[in-house]
């Protein structure tokens, strides 16, 4: 069985030399463990944070050891009551072909109810992030004008569509290519979208949001955040979900220069961590599941094949190679 190890902590953009794909023994499961043959691995922006030694909400990856991440696979052997060989499970033993994982981090999933990869994306962690971040952190309400960055990505594409389905007055998205912008408007039903690489974010946002912004869902940080604060309406809310524009920065980056606008607007900025919102999971699945099933909520996945391409897939997320959830298929 092959697995990916972190060899050294990347400075700036991760380099291939910081990682190694190594052979490892398959360990039979003990009581309350399962052995899983991984089928789909998740690569996510937050993993960049775990490659650094800095203290955060989740411990750094250990050097010289296998990395972790979301994964879905088939159970080969089981010591967990209620889980049998042939069942499929969602767990946290990613970045490897076979994983032996404990009951506490293993959830059975139904391969007949939805494609297995969706438990990592539209019906999984990124989906719940969108749902909880929009409805709870940003206190979205019908009639709000919503701006979301990273809008063609896993979280962003779902934020925009949920807002639309729940009666947003206007949904605006930004993304890093003209093709992604087209997808947002023509397929996902965004009212307006722009390519942040084509010019000033604040100017493009001003044009796209003539009535201002009630909710900004931030996946990006930097000039996007400043632009959204600049157009924030009275009582506006900003959910800080991610700041991917700074994940590879080696120096602290300047913050928004216009925070005083929060006084005028009584605006609110609040960070969100999906791990705090798993109480919403049943409600999320109940509401969003049927939308996904009926096609009312559309999703894309970018699928990269092979464990040997796991690292490239991860780097691809940071570069913007993906449209929708980036998945590694084994
Ligand atoms: P995505 O599927 O959105 O992939 C990341 C995207 O970020 C890329 O496709 C790329 O698209 C865009 N991007 C990369 N660099 C930049 C840049 N400098 N400026 C603007 N956009 C950039 O990933 P996820 O949906 O998984 O995650 C989206 C965000 O949500 C991330 O910031 C992530 O860290 C955060 N997150 C936070 C969680 C939480 O609990 N707080 C949970 C899950 C995700 P493009 O081509 O448009 O540039």
Image (tube, helix red, strand yellow):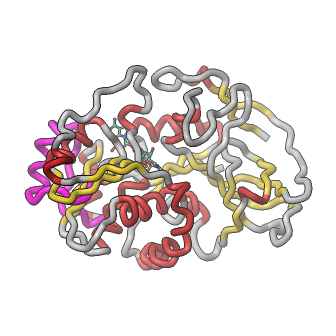
What stretch of residues is rendered in magenta? 188-216
Locate residue 107, reporting x and y percent.
70, 64
Vertical comparison of 80 with 49: above or below: below
In the rendered view, does 249 fall on the left or right side of 72?
left
Image quadrant, ligand 1: top left
Whether residue 105 appears in magenta in the rendering, the answer is no
Locate residue 311, reporting x and y percent.
58, 35
Q: Answer with the quarter of the image where residue 188 lies.
A: bottom left
Observer able to see residue 315:
yes
Identify which residue, 186 or 99, lies in the foreground.
99
Residue that appears at 63% across and 46% down:
69
Observer able to see residue 185:
no
Say how many tags the image has.
0
Residue that appears at 79% across and 67% down:
86
Identify which residue, 247 or 274, lies in the foreground.
274
Q: Answer with the quarter of the image where residue 72 lies.
A: bottom right
Identify which residue, 296 or 59, lies in the foreground.
59
Vertical comparison of 223 with 162: above or below: above
Residue that appears at 86% across and 59% down:
32
Locate residue 104, reporting x and y percent.
75, 58
Residue that appears at 51% across and 41% down:
46
Whether residue 210 appears in magenta in the rendering, the answer is yes
Vertical comparison of 154 with 196: above or below: below
Locate residue 275, reporting x and y percent.
55, 55
């Amino acid at each position: 069985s092959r697995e990916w190890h972190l060899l050294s902590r990347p400075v700036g953009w991760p380099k291939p030399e910081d990682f190694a794909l190594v052979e490892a023994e398959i360990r039979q499961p003990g009581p309350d463990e399962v052995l899983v043959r991984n089928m789909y691995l998740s690569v996510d922006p937050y993993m960049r944070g775990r490659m650094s030694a800095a203290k955060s909400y989740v411990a750094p990856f250990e050097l010289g050891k296998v990395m972790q991440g979301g994964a879905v696979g088939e159970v080969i052997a089981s010591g967990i009551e209620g889980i049998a060989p042939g069942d499929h499970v969602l767990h946290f033993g990613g970045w490897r072909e076979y994983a032996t994982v404990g009951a506490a981090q293993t959830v059975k999933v139904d391969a007949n109810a939805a494609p297995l990869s969706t438990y990592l994306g539209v019906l999984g962690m990124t989906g719940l992030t969108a749902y909880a971040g929009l409805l709870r952190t940003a206190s979205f309400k019908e009639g709000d004008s919503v701006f979301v960055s990273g809008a063609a990505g896993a979280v962003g594409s779902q934020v925009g569509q949920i807002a639309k389905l729940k009666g947003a007055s206007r949904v605006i998205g930004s993304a890093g290519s003209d093709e992604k912008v087209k997808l947002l408007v023509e397929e996902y039903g965004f009212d307006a979208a722009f390519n942040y690489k084509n010019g000033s974010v604040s100017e493009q946002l001003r044009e796209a949001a003539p009535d201002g912004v009630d909710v900004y869902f931030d996946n990006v940080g930097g000039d996007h955040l400043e632009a959204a604060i600049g157009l924030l309406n009275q009582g506006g809310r900003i959910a800080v979900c991610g700041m991917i524009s700074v994940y590879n920065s080696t120096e602290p980056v300047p913050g928004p220069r216009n925070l005083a606008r929060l006084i005028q607007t009584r605006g609110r900025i609040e960070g969100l961590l999906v791990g705090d919102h798993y109480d919403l999971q049943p409600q999320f699945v109940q509401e969003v599941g049927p939308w996904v099933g009926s096609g009312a909520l559309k999703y894309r996945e970018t699928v990269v094949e092979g464990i040997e391409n796991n690292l490239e897939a991860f780097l691809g997320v940071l570069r913007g190679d993906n449209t929708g959830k980036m998945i590694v298929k084994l």
